[in-house]
C-alpha cells in the first residue's frame, strides 16, 4: 500500500518497504529493506529506519535485514536511527536524535525523548515515557506506565563486564525514576 503517502525526492527507500496510508518521509531519510511503516506516521529528515546490524558489514552479499515495524500514528523526529529488527507500537513519539538498537521493542503510546538511546534487545511496555538523554542498557525490560526522567542511565552492575554472562535489569510497571 502507498495511498496518499508523501516521500521526499531526497529520501532513499532500499528494497522491500511497505508504507501505510498517509505516511510522510521527509528529506534525506533512509528506509532500509524489510521495513513496515504503518498509517499516519511521519519519519523526520535525516533519519534511518531499519539500519543494518553489524553483520552486514562482514558479509553484505549474504545479509538479510530483520523486519522492522513502526506502528500507526507514530512520529520519528529528525536525525533518529532505528536499527533492524525493532518494533515500535502505535502512537510512538520520539524526540530528535534518538538511537534504538537492534531487536528492541516499544509498546503502544511510548515517548522516547531527545538524545535517548537503547542498547540491543530492550523491551519497553505500553505508555512508557523516557525524557531526554536517557540510556537503557541492553536486554533490559521496563514495565508499562513507567517514567524515566532526564539523564537517567541504566546498567546491570556498577562496572559492567564485557560479554554475554550478564543478567539484564528490569524496571517494574508504574515506576518513576529520576
Image (cartoon, grey):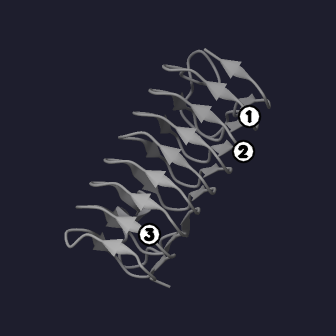
State the count of labels. 3
Q: Nearer the viewer, residue 86 or 42?
A: 42
Q: Is residue 41 visible?
A: yes
Q: Which quarter of the figure is the C terminus placed in? A: top right
Question: Between marks 1 and 3, how big is the CA–CA gap?
Answer: 27 Å
- Give the residue drawn at x 72%, y 43%: 125
Horizontally, residue 137 falls left or right of residue 51, namely right
Q: Which type of secondary structure does the marked residue at label 1 adopt?
A: loop
Q: Nearer the viewer, residue 131 or 118?
A: 131
Q: Position of residue 88 (x, y in %)?
A: 59, 55
Horizontally, residue 122 falls left or right of residue 33, namely right
Question: Between marks 3 and 2, how big is the CA–CA gap?
Answer: 23 Å
Instruction: From the image, tell me which residue sits under label 1.
Output: 145
Q: Position of residue 22 (x, y in %)?
A: 46, 72
Front label number (3 vs 2) = 3
Instruction: From the image, tell me which residue sits under label 3.
Output: 23
Q: Which type of secondary structure does the marked residue at label 3 adopt?
A: loop
- Give the residue drawn at x 71%, y 30%: 146
Front label number (1 vs 3) = 3
**Residue 176's image quarter?**
top right
Q: For mark 2, does the 10 Å Cα neighbourhood hold few (<14), some (14 to 19), or many (20 or more) residues?
A: many
- Give the residue drawn at x 43%, y 43%: 99
Horizontally, residue 35 falls left or right of residue 146, namely left
Amino acid at each position: 500500500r502507498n495511498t496518499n503517502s508523501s516521500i521526499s525526492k531526497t529520501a532513499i527507500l532500499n528494497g522491500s518497504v511497505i508504507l501505510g496510508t498517509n505516511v510522510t518521509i521527509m528529506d534525506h531519510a533512509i528506509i532500509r529493506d524489510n521495513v513496515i511503516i504503518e498509517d499516519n506516521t511521519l519519519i523526520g529528515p535525516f533519519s534511518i529506519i531499519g539500519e543494518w546490524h553489524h553483520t552486514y558489514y562482514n558479509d553484505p552479499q549474504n545479509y538479510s535485514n530483520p523486519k522492522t515495524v513502526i506502528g500507526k500514528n507514530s512520529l520519528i523526529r529528525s536525525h533518529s536511527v532505528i536499527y533492524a529488527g525493532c518494533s515500535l507500537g502505535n502512537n510512538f513519539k520520539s524526540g530528535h536524535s534518538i538511537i534504538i538498537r537492534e531487536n528492541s521493542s516499544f509498546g503502544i503510546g511510548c515517548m522516547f525523548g531527545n538524545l535517548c538511546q537503547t542498547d540491543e534487545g530492550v523491551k519497553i511496555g505500553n505508555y512508557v515515557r523516557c525524557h531526554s538523554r536517557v540510556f537503557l542498557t541492553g536486554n533490559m525490560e521496563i514495565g508499562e506506565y513507567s517514567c524515566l526522567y532526564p539523564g537517567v542511565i541504566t546498567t546491570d552492575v556498577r562496572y559492567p563486564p564485557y560479554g554475554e554472562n550478564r543478567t539484564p535489569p528490569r524496571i517494574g510497571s508504574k515506576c518513576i525514576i529520576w
